[in-house]
Amino acid sequence: MDKPYLIEQIGRAAFQRACTQARNAAPAMGTRTQSQSYHSPLPQWIDRMIWEQADGLTTAQRLRLSVSMYRDLPCYGVLLGLMCRYQGLDRVHQKLYWFEVRRMLSHGDPAWSGPIEYHLALDWFERNDDGATIWQTLRRAANPALLRSLLRSSGPAAWSLKMALYRELLADPAWHAAIYASVLASYGGVYGQIDRVEALTVLHHLILPHRDDAEWRSMLTVLGHGDRYTNGFGVKAFHAPQQDDEGSGDQAHRG
């Protein structure tokens, strides 16, 4: 079984229509600006064909074929199928999966990146105990496109991981808008991870010529009050210290 066979089974015209719909919806996946969505049983069918009905393929071949289909049909459904298969892979093939993810994000194609960024935030940084390991895997020797994807998906990632990256990037104003968006997601996401004291320090170093001044003032106000490690939904950071040198709760923001 190979890609031409799968496309033939789907039908070339039907597959092309599905790919166009998926690519149009993919860049804004999971964002406030998402105006289109792609929902279809096709990703599940592709997953079953590759992983359950394709005789004679090695695990690496199945994985690469799934990734190849994703490049044509970039959608969360394909990634969700791969996520389920990932749990049963050995470490060698899990590393191969992340190699392919890195390669796609490094390319900078918004259609490839959009669903992967949503997948990272939802399935790895928000819910998975391996989130820190995956963060470091992606961050290591990352090119600018990959780093931007990492920042866009970073809301639920541990604050300490984000802060270390902010420190590396703050000296270059070209990164400031992306850092600001990451801080906003850290505060405004349901499972966003934040340290309000450190977030305020970051914001005061940013140069944002096109910022929304009302939003900016609001962020400075809300970050200056309330529990240090609690986001805008009242959810406390998973890895927050029980107490810190500056005090905890509102005391860290007074005076």
Image: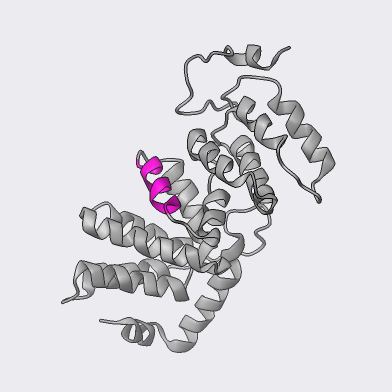
Say which of 249 and 9 sits in front.
Answer: 249
User: x, y percentage for residue 230?
Assistant: 58, 25
User: x, y percentage for residue 253?
Assistant: 68, 17
Farthest-out residue, right: 213
Q: Quadrant of residue 51?
A: bottom left
Magenta stretch: includes residue 105: no
* Left/right of residue 17 with respect to residue 252 in the rendered view: left
Say which of 131 and 174 sits in front.
Answer: 174
Say which of 71 and 142 sits in front.
Answer: 142
Tell me if I can see residue 39 in this picture: no
Quadrant the N terminus occupies: bottom left
State the extent of the magenta-drawn residues as a range: 130-140
Magenta stretch: includes residue 132: yes
Q: Is residue 184 above or below residue 238?
A: below
Q: Is residue 115 above or below residue 178?
A: below
Say which of 70 and 14 sits in front.
Answer: 70
Tell me if I can see residue 252 in this picture: yes
Quadrant the C terminus occupies: top right
Kindly identify the residue that appears in the image at 45 percent across and 66 percent down. 104
Kindly identify the residue that appears in the image at 21 percent across and 67 percent down. 59
Q: How is the image coloured?
A: one colour
Q: Quadrant of residue 52?
A: bottom left
User: x, y percentage for residue 68?
Assistant: 38, 74
Kindly identify the residue that appears in the image at 77 percent across and 47 percent down. 208
Farthest-out residue, front: 171
Kindly identify the residue that appears in the image at 60 percent across and 30 percent down. 231
Q: Quadrant of residue 22?
A: bottom right
User: x, y percentage for residue 216?
Assistant: 78, 38
Report the predominant secondary structure element of the magenta stretch.
Answer: helix
Q: Is residue 113 above or below residue 181?
A: below
